[in-house]
Image (cartoon, helix red, strand yellow):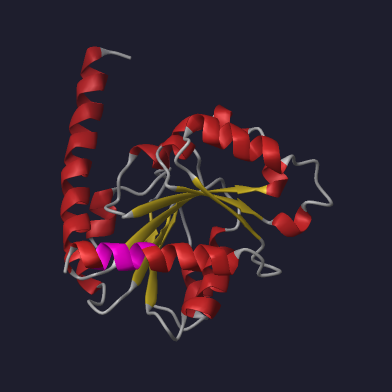
Amino acid sequence: MKKQEVMVLEDLLGSNKKIAGDIRRKLSEKGILAINLLSSPGAGKTSLLEKLSEVLIPSYKMAVIEGDIETERDAERIRAKGIQAWQISTGGACHLDAKMVGKVFSEIPTDLDFLFIENVGNLVCPASFDLGESLRCVLLSIPEGDDKPKKYPKAFFTSDALIISKTDLLDKMPFNVDRAVQESLDVNPKLKVFKISSVEGSGIKEFVDYLVKNLKKLRRANA
């Protein structure tokens, strides 16, 4: 990589970090827990959000920022659940950045509990961009295979939680859960691991408990 390219990338990431820090501070002051969801395309992010909404509502209020290269399909699915959702179409960019999130920030209600950010389906680019989240979760679905953590380590290294998704397909796919979990922990020993099926609902309660625990922690810190 040329020196000029390195300088441009450093300037871009530096600017993103500043905007993300401002977003995180404002959300924290409002007592809103922001969760950035990373995964490959089709790993089940939107399905997870749909299932979470069934458990979180009406006890908690949630909203979703959807990131995709084109279309509003995922946002439409979330809105069909009665949840406010904003679609960010990147027009070709392989990730969301803090500036994109900042453009819809003024529309975010102040009485939210959870703000979920469904990133563009990609295990590479999104890992480099802080969006102002309090938690980052990476999904690894059963159909993808169990070898991804060490092939795409940054997504796992920068995350707080690993979600093994689509576990209802375990008996149909050659996926070694123990291997996937161990390789993920080799990359990031601090990862909290969840095994979830959005179809069957298994593992959802444990993940919701984790989210609520972190929401309470955030609010205590800003009390």
Q: Residue at x 75, y 59 (%)?
A: 168
Q: Is residue 189 magenta?
A: no
Q: Which region shows up in magenta?
A: 214-219
Q: Residue at x 22, y 50 (%)?
A: 20
Picture coordinates of residue 50 (x, y %)?
A: 55, 72
Picture coordinates of residue 139 (x, y %)?
A: 55, 50
- Seen in the picture, residue 168 relative to 19 is either above or below; the reply is below
Q: Which residue is more in the foreground, 94 or 47?
A: 47
Q: Which residue is more in the foreground, 52 or 223?
A: 223
Picture coordinates of residue 95 (x, y %)?
A: 40, 45
Is residue 203 visible from the viewing direction of this image?
Answer: yes
Is residue 120 visible from the viewing direction of this image?
Answer: no
Q: Is residue 1 left or right of residue 160?
A: left
Q: Is residue 141 left or right of residue 133?
A: right
Q: Residue at x 33, y 74 (%)?
A: 113
Quarter the C terminus occupies: bottom left
Q: Residue at x 57, y 49 (%)?
A: 41
Answer with the quarter of the image where residue 184 lies: top right
Quarter the N terminus occupies: top left
Q: Which residue is more in the foreground, 162 or 26?
A: 162
- Seen in the picture, residue 4 relative to 177 is either above or below; the reply is above
